Amino acid sequence: MEKIAVLTSGGDAPGMNAALRAVVHQAAMHEVQVIGISHGYEGLLNREFAPLDLSSVDDIIQRGGTILRSARSERFKSEAGQEQAVANLREAGIEGLVVIGGEGSYRGAQALAERGIATVGVPGTIDNDIPGTDYTIGFDSAVNTVVEAMNKIRDTATAHERTFVVETMGRKSGQIALTAGLAGGAESILIPEVPYNLDNVCQRLKWSAARGKVHSIILVAEGVASGYTIAQEVKKRTGFDTRVTVLGHLQRGGAPTAFDRILASRLGAQAVESLLEGGSALAMSYVKDEVLAVPFREVFAGKKQINRSLYDLAAILAI
Ligand code: ATP
């Protein structure tokens, strides 16, 4: 291969830039040219192509977001859209493509691979919801952002003897809420994967109050319920002064953690190696500190589970 391309797709995640940097450096080592495609699959359809050289990726390892911008593209999901995408890549002489994004982006990458474009995926999403990899790029940064916010909220919760409901991202996945809740000492963690009982949550708050702890944080993943709904119910059932913080897009921004930078660098570099070895329809994955290339089909057949022992531990530590 002499020319490959790279794009970022779906929700942005801290560390996407570090992955881009690794793609460009690894390709440069093999004297392979890299084309950056802006705005994900939408930009692929609009031929938003520009060469990326080493100087294009200077000074980005520490930056959140993505210098290529990200987007979602409905047009690309259609047969006609995918045919157009393949034609645009062929016309530009692009022989391989690295897609940095979440599982939806992987499905797009699989479609391109089936149409004859060698395509590999790098897991870039804060949700950590992609099967086959222990971690996705951006998750650790998002968790640290939530923990930092919890530290601040706990100060005011303590000062005013209040209960706080903190809503995190995670429509289908409770990975962020669970991990941040454990690290931040949440009194209760509500996630989509585990049914919850609000009476139990309230009972725990009352026990805590009875032993003199008059501040609490309930962490709720957005997929469970709105933080406001939970807060209203808690206030009704306990009478405690209950406030809400919705962290929202705060969780996507900011500099990536060292863990995410290293993860992104390793996975981005491996993506280029996989393409140059003739691989396609492969997802770069991080398993037990090793970087592997896992077929997209295996990823799609899997289901990312939460680590139930972390959930149980969090419950013990919160008492
Ligand atoms: P995040 O986890 O951050 O939401 P994601 O990659 O899962 O990231 P999606 O919006 O699901 O985000 O997908 C990104 C883009 O990938 C879509 O806008 C669409 O262009 C493409 N895509 C998603 N699903 C498919 C599919 N089944 N077939 C082809 N393309 C798809």
Image: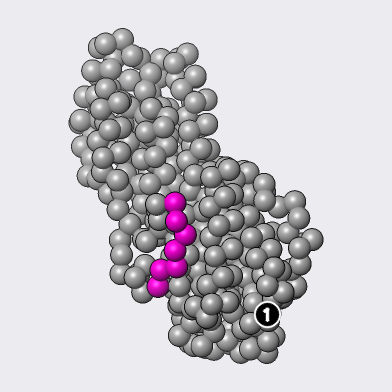
Q: Residue 298's spot in the image, x, y percent?
A: 34, 70
Q: What residue appears at the point 69 percent right and 68 percent down from the top-left corner?
A: 29
**Along the line of sight, which residue is nearer the eye, 158 or 308?**
308
In this rendering, would 301 be left or right of 157?
A: left
Which residue has dot 1 on it? 3
Q: What residue appears at the point 32 percent right and 36 percent down from the top-left corner?
A: 189
Above or below 37: residue 175: above
Q: Residue 15's spot in the image, x, y percent?
A: 59, 52
Above or below 182: residue 35: below
Quarter-wise, where is residue 290 in the image? bottom left
Specify the principal SS of the magenta part.
Answer: strand
What is the magenta range?
289-295
Pick the quarter of the image with the C terminus. Answer: top left
Pick the quarter of the image with the N terminus. Answer: bottom right
Instruction: Please tell me whether mark 1 sits on a helix, a strand or a loop.
Output: strand
In this rendering, would 234 be left or right of 286?
A: left
